[in-house]
Image: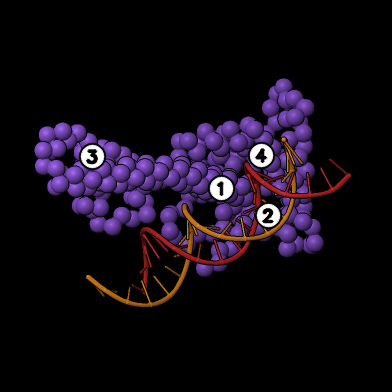
Chain colours: A purple, B orange, C red
Amino acid sequence: MFMAQEEPGLALGLSLGSGAGHHHHHLPQPKEAVPLEPYLSLSLAGAGAVKREEEERALIYCSDDLVEGYNSSGGGGSRKKLRLTKDQTALLEDHFKEQSTLSHKQKASLARQLNLRPRQVEVWFQNRRARTKLKQTEVDCELLKRCCETLTEENRRLHRELQHLRALHHHQHHHPAAAFFMPATATASVCPSCNGAPPAHATDRPATKRSFFATKSAAC
DNA sequence: AAAGCTTAAAAAGTTACTTCA
DNA sequence: GTTGAAGTAACTTTTTAAGCT
């Protein structure tokens, strides 16, 4: 289903009517109200050259945004992109650490603090969640790779041991007295990487996507 | 109770822009 | 100055979950 986005131009028209009230979850609700004041980036005391440059960038973006919008579909102008300042990102990160999703109230409050639109805060959180997930997937992937390497090596070792035992068996068959000198090489009975734990699939139903890595990391 | 519809929110996927080596 | 890769803000589409009829 297509969801209408919050267009800056549209927001200007709508923002006169409704305030940023709290809405009930999953009930039809009006478009989120957007503050009328210009969206300026954070300006903090003692800003250095780099910071001033960042702020200027955000300022240019924001004023354009108010005047003509930034959607690439509009008026031939290309979509402009804001780079959030370090302070803005830091505050967003702080909130993300506490909670990876936001209520309407939290979003509005954070947007006010940062002088951003609620939509920008929302997008930042969406992207941040995606980055977190991607990073976790990479970690999981690395874990599985290592697990695979360990098991491959173990498999090789067991094959060698099996060959050795077969050779011994053959030797004993032809020279029964040699059994007294059999070395104690037959040691492996449990996968060392699983540390004796019963395999997850022995008792569980097929793992869901979400639970798969949880069981995997416990075993390997 | 079950089925189908509607809605908002989140996830997934994509585009466009910036920065840096 | 140019180029390509990486990072990310902003966007679109798809999926999910909940409420209602």
Same chain for marks 3 and 1?
Answer: yes
Q: Callout 3: few (<14), some (14-19), or many (20+) C-alpha neighbours within 10 Å? A: few
Quick check: C12 left or right of A69? left
Which of the chains bears the disc numbered 2?
A
Q: Earlier in the sequence, mark 1 or mark 4?
A: 4
* 3 vs 1, front mark: 3
Amino acid type at mark 3: Ala
Q: Residues at badges 2 and 1 in contact (C-beta under 8 Å)?
A: no
The alpha-carbon separation of the residues under discs 2 and 1 comes to: 20 Å
Which is more toward the observer, A135 or A12?
A135
Quarter of the image with the C terminus of chain A in it: top left
* Relative image position of residue A3 (x, y in whole percent): 55, 63
Q: Residue at x 52, y 68 (%)?
A: A1
* Relative image position of residue A50 (x, y in whole percent): 75, 29
Q: Element at badge 3?
A: loop
Which of the chains bears the disc numbered 3?
A
The alpha-carbon separation of the residues under discs 2 and 3 comes to: 67 Å
Residue to which mark 2 is pinned = A8
Q: Element at badge 1?
A: helix
Same chain for marks 4 and 2?
Answer: yes
Q: Earlier in the sequence, mark 3 or mark 1?
A: 1
Amino acid type at mark 2: Pro
Q: Residue at x 30, y 44 (%)?
A: A160
Res. A149 image quadrant: top left
What label does residue A127 carry, if any?
A: 1
Residue to which mark 4 is pinned = A84
Q: Callout 2: few (<14), some (14-19), or many (20+) C-alpha neighbours within 10 Å? A: some
* 4 vs 2, front mark: 4
The alpha-carbon separation of the residues under discs 1 and 4 comes to: 13 Å
* 1 vs 4, front mark: 1
The alpha-carbon separation of the residues under discs 4 and 3 comes to: 57 Å
